[in-house]
Image (tube, coloured by chain):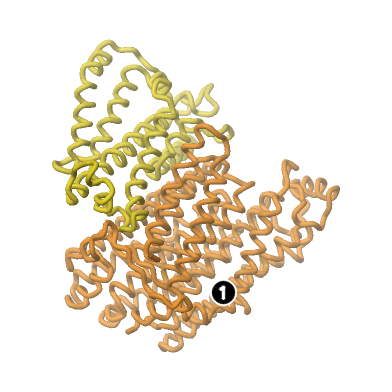
Amino acid sequence: MSDALLPLLIALPLLAAIFPLLFGLRFERVGWPVAMATSLSVAGLAAWLAWAVSPWSGGSRRFVHDLAGYPAPYGIELVGDGLSALLALLIAIVAVAVLVYARTTGPDSNAFYSGFLLLTGGLLGMALTGDLFNLFVFLEIVGLVSYALIASNDDPRAAYGALKYLFLGTAGASLYLIGVGYAFVATGTLNMRDMATELAALGYNDPLVQAAFGFILIGFMLKIAIFPLHTWQPDAYTYAPDTISAYISALVSTTAAYALIRIAYDVFTVDFFAANPLITDAVLLVASVSIVVGSLLALLQTDLKRVFAYSSVAQFGMILAAIGLQSETALFGAVIHLVGHGLMKATLFMGAGVLSSAYGARTVADYAGLAKRAPITSGMMAVTGLALVGIPPSVGTLGKWFIALGAVEEGSWGVAALIFISTLLTLTYIGRLLETLYFNPLADTDDAAVAGDATDAVDATDDSSFVADGGVDRVATERVVVVVVLALSTVALFAAADPLAAMLDPVFGRFFQ
Amino acid sequence: MSSDRLDGDTNGIARQRPMYTESQVIMTTVKAVIPFVLTYGLFITFHGTSSPGGGFQGGALVASVVLMIAFAFGIESTREWLSNSLVVGLGTVGVAIFAGIALVPMALGENFLDYTAYYPVLGDTLGLKEYEFVKYGMEAVEIGGIAFIVSGVLMGLFFALAAGVTPPSGTASDAAEASDSDGETDVDDGETAGDTATEAGENE
């Protein structure tokens, strides 16, 4: 009965999304408890699914649930295997972490928690579906809710960022749909498994098949935010409320990248890449440009959230490069980097959110000397930043190492060199942040003076008890605790290479037959 | 975008709210038309499984009845007459019914949305054959799920748009919250806010 977990994982958050609104008619502030209870249940179910598909449970390694009982090529099926279970677990864990963080920061409306649950349900749907059109439906749910959540900030620039994301995101989803339409015309099926066999029979050099892949690839590049299609992403991440920046940066592009991996390797398969060297080279070229330009742009930013946003462009460039390399090692690195990047970006955005709500810091220069005032948060941001650079032991090391190793194995020395250069550039902008945090004296601005006066009286060392900018309220302890736990998890996952490999083994065995 | 539109209206709310003018022609026409539109909407909803139409189209027609009443008799008074609870209730209860119909077969040991799972339980009571459960199950989703959701969301959207944008400093109005009963509605809130931001940019 483990396959029953799949529809439950998707239906539970979507159903729970109505309760904040419904109870909101009677009571104030019911959104958080509902969202938290749901996310904890989803996390439990996701952990159960991950255990069920893992080699240690001894059961089946792949679960299929036919919706309404119609068998696969005709009906929609949900699929849980090692890869999708891993992603579902990541989504559930980040959702719980973000909710803990959101308890005191808000946005404190019941509508926000409804949107949050809808987004969680949509992301889980993308991770678990085995049908191309169903994937589009969930892609749209995720997109639509993301636009609304980003626009929920009071800052009018957030609305502008959301509008830009709305236009580009809708274009991306439409391109994906056109690609699926071409593939449907070519094969007459929408089921991923079935389409893989049909495409193999049709031949991978059919222009219709090539066009289908091209549209799907560009659609997802828009959704993932690969340079030059990344323009929506910095504004969206920067002006969204901190809670939502952390959630969206950690999961939305990640799930889209997962979907691209799934389609590239499960539907089109490595044989498609082998038959179309031009498309493979184009993927590698775009990915390489994205790695370098994303890192350089991150280096040029002054706003800290913008630095992290452009850094995502570079990190997803690496993942796209791993997709184009057709190497099992590189793809393993890509999956690790997907998970690791999600956790690291969530930590960094939350850490930046803690410091900005306490001291009003937005630009990198504003963070001068804050390590003395907020040693725990700063320390954890430093740990996570170094993990993002790829300093061992951290999950960032693993991901980059396996992608670079795969590139070397395939003889793509250029990609390996670019990953090295990008690492140096990452070190530069993270190093600049660390220098500002630890070695620059406190800036003598009004903000710092206000916060300083208030803080000196209370205490200057205990991280959790400093007074917020303007002295309105304190930063809640659990926000710092979440940052600490996530930061330590990025370090602890360094040891997880072998279990992850065991978990992904059957999936990769199918990808690289 | 002339700047005088903002005169004496610092938060830009009043200018977005059109004045209501009472018109005998519109009120009489709407009174004459709405029974037919409502009937047609219900017809389309109920015939969803056996003829063109369905919950989505029917729900939209039912919501259009409320829109017409609002245009004829004033949006504010219509909002008070309908109350937020009804609008939110329609959307949320629709989702609950849909999810309930889909999840109960799983409790009975069948697949998600598998209507035939109801046959052993309800077959004798309702006097239906097994294959008829597929038809009536779908009908139940169309009527209780989709039609409710669509009409609730459309009404909520309309009232939210009519209420204009919440000023950044104030708390969210009930109408704005009511409209957030679905992902689709969420987006349109985003669009509204986005449009306003663009307008503000042009005003500069």
Query: Is label 1 in a helix, a strand or a loop?
Result: helix
Q: Is residue B53 left or right of residue A62?
A: left
Chain at tag 1: A
In the image, residue A139 lies at what x, y percent? 36, 56
- Crowding at dot 1, Cα within 10 Å, few <14 / some 14-19 / many 20+, comes out as many
Say which amino acid is labelled 1: Gly
Query: Chain A appears what colour?
Result: orange
Q: Is residue A11 above or below residue A131?
A: above
Q: Residue at x 41, y 87 (%)?
A: A410
In the image, residue A222 lies at what x, y percent? 38, 60
Q: Is residue A448 above or below residue A388?
A: above
Q: Furthest-top residue in view?
A: B24
Label 1 sits on residue: A396
Q: Quadrant of residue A332?
A: bottom left
Front residue of A424 and A109? A109
Q: Residue at x 59, y 50 (%)?
A: A102
Work out which quarter of the rendered image holds the N terminus of chain A and state it: bottom left
Q: Furthest-left residue in view?
A: B51
Q: Is residue A127 above or below residue B104?
A: below
Query: Chain B appears what colour?
Result: yellow
Q: Is residue A486 left or right of residue A324?
A: right
Q: Residue at x 61, y 69 (%)?
A: A489
In the image, residue B157 lies at what x, y percent? 38, 34
Q: Is residue A78 above or below residue A450?
A: below
Q: Furthest-front residue in view?
A: B124
